Amino acid sequence: MEMLARWVLKHRFLQFDSGFADSLQRRTARRTLAVGSLLFLVILGLPPAWLIWTALSVMDGVGLSDGSRWHLIFPASGPYWLAYAAVTLLVYFFFAPIWERMLYLAVRFAIPVPGYTFDEHQQSVLAHARVAAQPFILAAMILAMALGTGMIAAASAGWPTSVPLYAWVCVTLGLSATSAPLLLLVWRLPDDTLTEIEAAT
Amino acid sequence: VTDKSVSFHNRLKMLRVERGLSRKELADITDVHPQTIGYIERRQFNPSIELALRLSAALGVGLDAIFSTEPFELLDDAALLASRKAS
């Protein structure tokens, strides 16, 4: 079964020259992928961020020694966090490689691949995207720093529980930052279909 | 993605179609990606002088016949007939 899944991934679904890769070149498909990617990142990062925020804001001023209110807000917190971590990790490790590969396939025009042409314009497109993504990368860094500083400054009863969640938020922000140039390309590349490229018109 | 400083006008598409070449065929001849030809035709990218010379050689015309800083004059019916008679 695993062998079959690998074969499908390699030869039918995520291959550089597959029909699926060609269909991902269309603008509608690329933009759907971009919106899906944003949703994927939000789903990964928003719940932990919200929980950190809740923990810090509700417990603010309570003091580290008093954890009773924290347990009132999240009863049976241990199994809850365990289940949450398991589900998000499962989702992440299952979808992240496929998702990243789909992003690369959707913008294969701007990705250097051995054995394929990578001309001056492709290089300039990739360089432009990297420059355009800098503000997003900076925003992700500032957000991570602000959240971390906020956690330390609040020093409430909820913050020890928030630490692993904060690490998960950082993973999501890092993932968003590193994929920002690809997401920009996915959204912006023009729609040159194979029919247009191969027709002498 | 689009180069905002583009100012060159070009007749690349017209010359390519006249020769019955697809973007892919012209790209193969000039060793670039087919979509790069599309970018140049849409005036979203100015090729380097090296690539411009390769395009010029592939189409068998001078650089000034493909690229210009001024818009190319439109060919009206009379001009087309005259050029056909002359050739």
Image: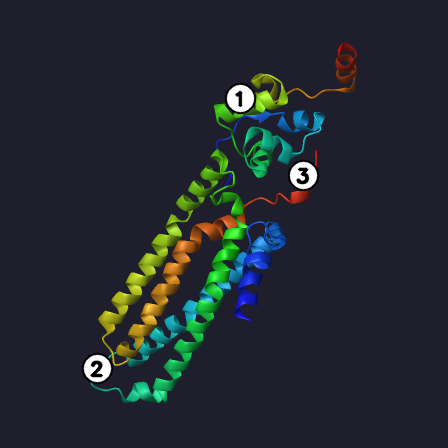
Q: Position of residue B64 (x, y in %)?
A: 58, 17
Whole-Å distance between the Cαs marked 1 and 3? 23 Å
Residue A187 vertical placement versus A200 (above, below) = below
* Classed neighbour count for the residue bearing mark 3: other residues with Cα under 10 Å, few (<14), some (14–19), many (≥20): some
Name the residue that disc number 1 marks.
Answer: B53
Locate residue B23: give its quadrant.
top right
Q: Can residue A169 be seen in this snapshot?
A: yes
Q: Chain letter of disc 1? A: B
Q: Earlier in the sequence, mark 2 or mark 3?
A: 2
Name the residue that disc number 2 marks.
Answer: A64
- Name the residue type under label 2: Leu
Assign the N terminus of chain A to one quadrant of the image.
Answer: bottom right
Q: Does label 3 lie on the same chain as label 1?
A: no
Q: Can residue B4 be seen in this snapshot?
A: no
Q: Chain letter of disc 2? A: A
Residue A176 vertical placement versus B23 (above, below) = below
Q: Secondary structure at mark 2?
A: loop
Q: Does label 3 lie on the same chain as label 2?
A: yes
State the residue in front, B25 or A178: B25
Q: Chain letter of disc 3? A: A
- Residue positioned 77% across, 12% down in the render: B82
Whole-Å distance between the Cαs marked 2 and 3? 68 Å
Q: Position of residue A191 (x, y in %)?
A: 61, 45
Q: Secondary structure at mark 3?
A: helix
- Name the residue type under label 1: Leu
